[in-house]
Image (tube, helix red, strand yellow):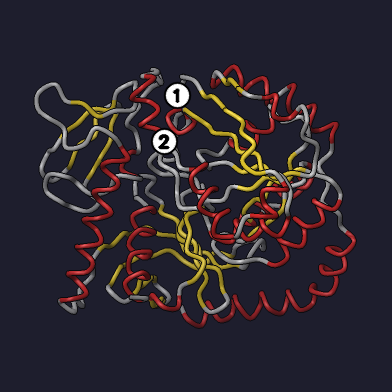
């Protein structure tokens, strides 16, 4: 397996060296551009569809009456359609910063190029992205950024990446924040089917250029975090909007992977509206309002958010105990896992199929060609792509792991590795 990885990496480097000067020359000549005609066309077609499909409503659009580009649009990341939902109500085309994984397909690269998307490697600082953002500002464009870096798993906002505050301080242009409500309940990251309810956007001018001038980076970060702090369930408890659909609980095990009753990892299973544990038969039902219920007994948690907070705390304690015991056994394991290798926006090359195993010091991928070991302190850029694939960099190679079983939680692997990395750093 190591030999195959080496061959793939060497072949990639040879191709890269042959194409590097040519690609760099193209990059220098290429100008990212969002076409106004396409922006208008998307609003008339896709925008109309999204408005009807998800009952979109926007408030405080008067923000744009006296605001001219350049400015920054910053929002929580709730679902795949976020850029299109936001763009539907903004007068000017938005140049969104998009993960470079979306550019690996030539077709997607072409489409994303038409709407002026800026490629960015997830969880890794990228100077090239900053240069392109500066160019958009110079040309008087609108820059779209999701400061959390990931879209939410449980309806609660994620911590804002601190570098975003540094970028705001550097750009010194106004920042507009659209608070989205109902997007997570309409289009949950874990679900395969969307729901009909209501999504609202409330646009706010968070910073003016003059305010940014006098605020420190820390002050900008604190204020930005306050603007983006959002809990979908706090909103829903007040509004109680029904989000109707079929099989509402299907694939909840992608996000909720620990049973609250018997504490088993990877034992939860969903079917229709039912969510149950295969080991102890704990059972709950997911209703139209996004809450758990059970008429026969009290549920352990009412919301996905509460359950996820509990399971992350339990997982942390569980892993700490395993490390304290110097546990050498496999902690969790999933089979029928595909491994692919690549780099940034280059197409991925299939490496093999095998079993992924977690240990206290890292993970091992076992396949017919041999084993691959990844130690915790050698893993960088850890993230989960929207297709629910685990990605990270290891020794200058990008590795992607994808389960053939659609019910295997890749989020589980991300959480375990993230917690072990935090423990490793002390």
Quarter holding residue 31: bottom right
Split into 4 quadrants, where in the image is the C terminus? bottom left
User: What is the distance, in whole Å, between disc 2 and disc 1 at their CAs?
Assistant: 10 Å
Indicate the position of residue 252 as horizontal and vertical percent values. 33, 38
Task: Say the numbered circle drawn on residue 195.
Answer: 1
Quarter holding residue 421: bottom left
Q: Residue at x 28, y 34 (%)?
A: 303
Q: Residues within 10 Å of mark 2 (few under 14, many from 20)?
A: some
Quarter holding residue 8: bottom right
Q: Residue at x 51, y 47 (%)?
A: 386
Q: Secondary structure at mark 1?
A: loop
Position of residue 128 relative to residue 76, above or below, is below
Residue 371 seen in this snapshot: no
Task: Say the numbered circle drawn on residue 294.
Answer: none
Q: Residues within 10 Å of mark 1 (few under 14, many from 20)?
A: many
User: Dots 2 and 1: beta carbons under 8 Å?
Assistant: yes
Q: Secondary structure at mark 2?
A: loop
Relative side of 251 to 63, left or right: left
Residue that extends furthest to the front in the rendered view of this protein = 214
Residue 188 seen in this snapshot: yes
Indicate the position of residue 288 as horizontal and vertical percent values. 34, 21
Relative side of 51 to 234, left or right: right
Position of residue 177 relative to residue 7, above or below, is above
Mark count: 2
Indicate the position of residue 43 as horizontal and vertical percent values. 73, 25
Residue holding disc 2: 191
Q: Residue at x 37, y 48 (%)?
A: 405
Indicate the position of residue 58 as horizontal and vertical percent values. 61, 22
């Amino acid at each position: 397996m190591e030999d195959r990885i080496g061959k793939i990496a060497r072949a990639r480097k040879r191709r890269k060296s042959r194409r590097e000067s040519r690609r760099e020359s193209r990059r220098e000549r290429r100008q990212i551009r969002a076409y106004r005609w396409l922006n208008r066309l998307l609003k008339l077609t896709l925008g109309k569809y999204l408005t009807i499909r998800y009952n979109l409503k926007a408030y405080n659009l008067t923000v744009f009456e006296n605001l001219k580009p350049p400015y920054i649009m910053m929002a929580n990341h709730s679902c795949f359609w976020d850029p299109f939902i936001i763009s539907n109500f903004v007068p000017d085309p938005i140049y969104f910063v998009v993960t470079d994984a979306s550019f690996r397909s030539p077709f997607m690269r072409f489409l994303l190029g038409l709407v002026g998307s800026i490629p960015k490697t997830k969880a890794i600082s990228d100077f090239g992205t900053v240069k392109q953002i500066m160019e958009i500002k110079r040309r008087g464009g609108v820059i779209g950024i999701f400061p959390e870096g990931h879209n939410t798993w449980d309806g609660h906002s994620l911590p804002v990446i601190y570098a975003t505050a540094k970028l705001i301080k550097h750009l010194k242009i106004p920042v507009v924040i659209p608070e989205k409500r109902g997007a997570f309940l309409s289009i949950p990251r874990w679900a395969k089917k969307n729901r009909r309810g209501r999504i609202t956007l409330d646009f706010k001018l968070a910073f003016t250029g003059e305010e940014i001038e006098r605020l420190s980076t820390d002050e900008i970060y604190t204020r930005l975090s306050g603007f983006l702090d959002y809990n979908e369930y706090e909103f829903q408890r007040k509004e109680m909007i029904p989000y109707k659909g079929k099989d509402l609980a299907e694939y909840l095990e992608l996000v909720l992977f620990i049973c609250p009753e018997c504490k088993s990892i990877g034992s939860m299973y969903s079917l229709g509206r039912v969510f149950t544990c295969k080991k102890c038969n704990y059972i709950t039902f997911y209703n139209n309002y996004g809450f758990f219920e059970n008429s026969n007994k009290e549920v352990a948690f009412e919301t996905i958010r509460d359950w996820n907070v509990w399971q992350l705390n339990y997982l942390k304690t569980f892993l700490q105990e395993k490390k304290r015991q110097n546990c050498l056994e496999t902690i969790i394991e999933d089979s029928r896992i595909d491994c692919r290798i690549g780099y940034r926006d280059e197409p991925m090359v299939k490496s093999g199929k095998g079993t992924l195993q977690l240990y206290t010091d890292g993970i091992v991928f076992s396949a017919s060609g041999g084993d691959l070991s990844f130690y915790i302190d050698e893993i960088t850029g850890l993230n989960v792509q929207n297709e629910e694939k685990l990605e990270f960099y290891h020794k200058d190679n990008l590795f992607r792991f994808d389960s053939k079983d659609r019910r295997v939680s890749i989020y589980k692997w991300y959480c375990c590795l993230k917690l072990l990395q935090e423990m490793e750093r002390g």
